[in-house]
Image (tube, rainbow, N blue to C red):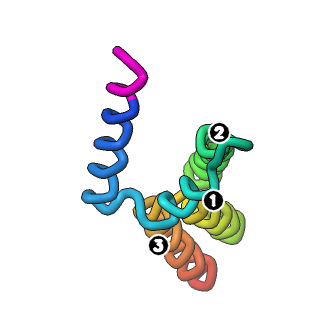
Amino acid sequence: MSGKELGQELKELVSSLQDQGILDEHFDQMKAVQNEQNPCFVANLITTFLGDAENVIGQLGTYLSAQDVNYPEVATLALKLKGSSSSVGGCRMALACSELRDVSDVNDHEG
């Protein structure tokens, strides 16, 4: 597959993700920062996001599977993941993290 075909395929994927509400305008803003002096900006940012997200999701899994859930820590991790998701345009992930944080806050005050 040629570079031009890959570029078109990537464009269509991003468009599809935006149509589905998975990515928002922040992704376009992030892409706009990329230039000839920093041609790998988006790839580096997404790679960093994915690595960090994997770690945070792993930590969330550990906390949420504990017998006594540490809701303040879950809320903190959800806020962290929400911020990083928002910065790369991951609006659906950010929304899910916001909901997790809200539920954690409620459960913390009930416990």
Provide the secondary structure element on which disc 3 rests: helix
Provide the secondary structure element on which disc 2 rests: loop
Q: Is residue 61 above or below residue 7?
A: below
Q: From the image, which quarter does the C terminus lie in?
A: bottom right
Disc 3: which residue: 99
Provide the secondary structure element on which disc 1 rests: helix
Q: Please name which of the two marks, 1 or 2, marks the residue nearer to the observer.
A: 2
Disc 1: which residue: 84
In primary-sequence order, the first of circles 1 and 3 is 1
**At 71% across and 43% down in the image, what residue appears?**
38
Disc 2: which residue: 39
Please name the amino acid that badge 1 sits on: Ser
Whether residue 109 is visible here, answered yes or no, is yes
In primary-sequence order, the first of circles 3 and 2 is 2
Give the alpha-carbon distance from disc 3 to disc 2, as whole Å.
35 Å
Mark 1 crowd level (few <14, some 14–19, many ≥20, 10 Å Cα): some
Q: Which residues are magenta?
A: 1-6
Based on the picture, tell me whether residue 4 belongs to the magenta stretch.
Answer: yes
The answer to whether the residues at label 3 and label 2 have Cβ atoms under 8 Å apart is: no
Q: Nearer the viewer, residue 72 or 22?
A: 22
How far across and how far down the image is residue 81, in percent?
61, 59
**At 27% across and 49% down in the image, what residue appears?**
16
Main SS of residues in magenta: helix
In primary-sequence order, the first of circles 1 and 2 is 2
Disc on res. 92: none
| Residue extending farthest front | 36
